[in-house]
Amino acid sequence: MFHKILIANRGEIALRIIRTCKEMGIKTVAVYSKPDSESLHVKLADESVCIGPAPSLSSYLNINAIISAAELTDAEAIHPGYGFLSENAQFAEICENCGITFIGPTAESMRIMGDKISARQAVIKVGVPILPGTKEGVHDVNEAIKVAKEIGFPVIIKATAGGGGRGMKIVHSPAALPNAFATARAEAQSGFGNPEVYIERYCESPRHVEIQILADKHGNVIHLGERDCSIQRRHQKVIEEAPSTVTTPELRKAMGDAAVAAAKAVNYSSVGTMEFLVDKNNNFYFMEMNTRVQVEHPVTEMVTGVDVVKEQIRSAYGLKLRYTQDDIQIKGHAIECRINAEDSVKFTPSPGKITDYHTPGGLGVRVDSFVYTNYSVLPHYDSLIAKLIVHADTRDEAIKRMARALDEYIVDGIKTTIPFHKRIMANKDFIEGNIDTGFIERLVLE
Ligand code: MV4
């Protein structure tokens, strides 16, 4: 196994990775920006290297500084976490060229899945269902109107180089298309450096259901069931749960088989996630693949007992998968609430010093965080300060356990989204499992 891994990230995910490394007997190197010197990931790692000033471009995205830190400390592998360099194929390539293992898939798999049109083409070949849409990029407005009429309105315009919902345009009529098409192309250019867009049939009020997969470098792929991430606000997930209230064993098997086939289609190795939309009739459609460990991976860990980060490291080292599909059983129900340093009504950032901090505990409660009393939440980075995860036998018990844990949680000195989560745990539609991607918008209007 690796002797030493460098973690090219900060915050809760850096701690999450360090914890698994410790259990595997692997030494860890933290990298940090100047204002992060007091962060827990620096204190918990065996060694640490400062890689630059506060702005991410100069530190956590600074490839030269990170590779230098790995060479300086003799780290054999780099774990990118999520965000930052985690889906940067060029970074993966540079690591490999320097003799450092990138803990993730190959640069080639990342490139295919990073381009949404090539991802669609790759999965269509193996029979994975997708929404009707264009097979190539759409380059002029007359062509856009022609294909939109063939698909049928409403349609959605998406950036080929996009992902995560940014820059999408929903179009309800031919008259609205020219404007939407021009705006989508301009936003794709400014957001992703590539103006190309494609068009799909728009699916109204879907569920966002994603399948976690595990793949080794020997062609073995299994899935760990689904997560329902329908509770989102402006394409930021707020609550995730496993299993989904829509999945029957049959639907889980169909989606799981599709996810495994899609992974095999791009020779995928490492952990990854296939994102699907599920419509009101329980039809599912492939949207995109995330080629990294995700924020919400703990809910899958709680219901399967599999340490996703440990399997990712083992896979990167070249070990064969030690589970077969039949070994994976979904047990109970898990929910994760993302606790952000934000105003819980306006969602504006609320950085600053945490004057008092107390985490909930008890049976079935897990807190993945990096903050402590007197820690100052920095304004430079993501506002996620903690993930509160609960596990129980049933969904009803998990909701009650989450409400209880949220009541115990004390974070003084800054505003957090804890009050917003308490509201959701008491919401009738949430309790009944009546959720789709429009849930929060309806709740905020109440
Ligand atoms: C869609 C869609 C409906 N129809 N595609 C958002 C994240 C990205 N991975 C895919 N997303 C969506 N793609 C089709 N053809 C709905 C979403 C979607 C969404 C759209 C508008 C507002 C909020 C949303 C939340 C989740 C998913």
Image (cartoon, helix red, strand yellow):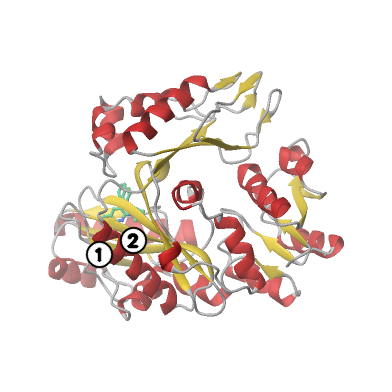
Note whether 166 is above or below 98 in the view shown: above
Residue occupying image coordinates x 32% and y 33% = 396
Q: Does mark 1 have its CB less than 8 Å from ligand 1?
A: yes
Q: Hey, what amino acid is under mark 2?
A: Lys
Say what amino acid the circle numbered 1 marks. Answer: Glu
- Please tell me which residue is depicted at 20% across the width and 60% down the height of the picture: 283
* Whole-percent x, y for residue 229 in the image: 37, 47
Left or right: 89 as drawn, with respect to 113? right
Q: Which residue is mark 1?
A: 200
Where is residue 446? Give x, y as percent: 25, 24
Q: Indicate whether 209 appears above or below 123.
A: above
Residue at left 62%, top 73%?
319
- Give me the C-alpha separation between circle 2 and circle 1: 8 Å
Any part of residue 78 in sight: yes
Q: Nearer the viewer, residue 127 or 332?
A: 332
Residue 168 placement, left or right of 205:
right
- Give above or below for 403 relative to 26: above
Image spot of residue 166 (x, y percent):
40, 52
User: Secondary structure beneath disc 2?
Assistant: strand
User: Which residue lies under the disc numbered 2?
Assistant: 158
**Count of number-bearing discs:** 2
Q: Which residue occupies the foreground of this view, 312 or 37?
A: 312
Is the residue marked by circle 1 packed among few (<14), some (14-19), or many (20+) residues within 10 Å? Answer: many
- Looking at marks 2 and 1 on the same chain, the residue that comes earlier in the sequence is marked by 2
The CB of the residue at mark 2 lies under 8 Å from ligand 1: yes
